Amino acid sequence: MDAITTNSLSRRFGDMNAVESLDLTVQKGEIYGFLGPNGAGKSTTINMLLGFPPPSSGSGTVLGYDLEHESVAVRQSIGVLPEDFGVYGRLTARKHVRFAIETKGANDDPDDLLARVELADVADRTAGGFSTGMKQRLALAMALAGNPDLLILDELSSGLDPNGAREMRAISREVGYTSPGRTLRTRFGRSYSGFCRPS
């Protein structure tokens, strides 16, 4: 079973074709860079994989679940770092991760997930004072809750300086190989040279 398959997947908004006849296969154990210029439909495609919105036509599966009819199961089975992730400034890093664990009905140790993204030393700090890079890593820790077989990272290095982007890629590369079928998407192809390859 592939991690992601789409067949002629399309999404229209009125008269505009945001995504047209997309055929895509992402194998388990593969890190996949989903690249393209602004307006090419990358975000719309990712949203369709999550069930928001459903496709206008075509079909697809994520971890064997049908995109249109089993979107809740899809969202429960994957981890997502969304492009527009925001933190609750008064909550600690640990409480953020604990919330993600409870939402997934998982039994992970929040401190273990924070350690995997190099935030163990700030577990009790409120997230409002975190840098952009720390917030991205916190979002990644939350995405890892439940040890998902598929990880979708949208705009992994958004808002980061070159050093922060390198650190984030290194961390995501490490966690991306801890279980099969993880997926990476970014707009900045040059930043991912030599990064996207089968495990």
Image (cartoon, grey):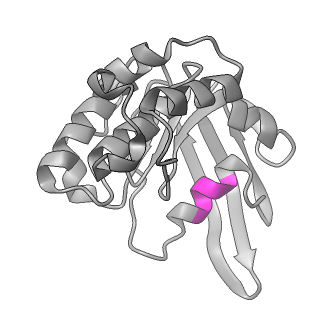
**Residue 122 in view:** yes
Give the residue drawn at x 41%, y 39%.
126
Which stretch is magenta? 44-48
Q: Name, please, the residue furthest toward the front.
A: 90
Give the residue drawn at x 30%, y 52%.
132
Viewer-nearest residue: 11 or 97: 97
- Please identify the dominant SS of the magenta region: helix
Viewer-nearest residue: 36 or 162: 162
Give the residue drawn at x 12%, y 48%.
163
Above or below for 37 versus 197: below
Give the residue drawn at x 27%, y 57%.
189
Q: Name, please, the residue furthest toward the bottom.
A: 15
Residue 81: x and y in percent read: 49, 44
Above or below for 162 versus 124: below
Viewer-nearest residue: 199 or 168: 168
Above or below for 139 versus 107: below
Above or below for 174 versus 139: above
Residue 116: x and y in percent read: 34, 20
Q: Name, please, the residue furthest toward the left.
A: 163
Q: Is residue 101 left or right of residue 154?
A: right
**Residue 179 in view:** no
Residue 187 figure quarter: bottom left
Residue 157: x and y in percent read: 30, 52
Q: Is residue 168 left or right of residue 74?
A: left
Residue 87: x and y in percent read: 48, 48
Q: Is residue 100 left or right of residue 87?
A: right
Residue 52 figure quarter: bottom right
Q: The N terminus appears in which quarter of the rendering? A: top right
Quick check: is 149 in the magenta stretch?
Answer: no
Q: The C terminus appears in which quarter of the rendering? A: top left
Residue 113 figure quarter: top left
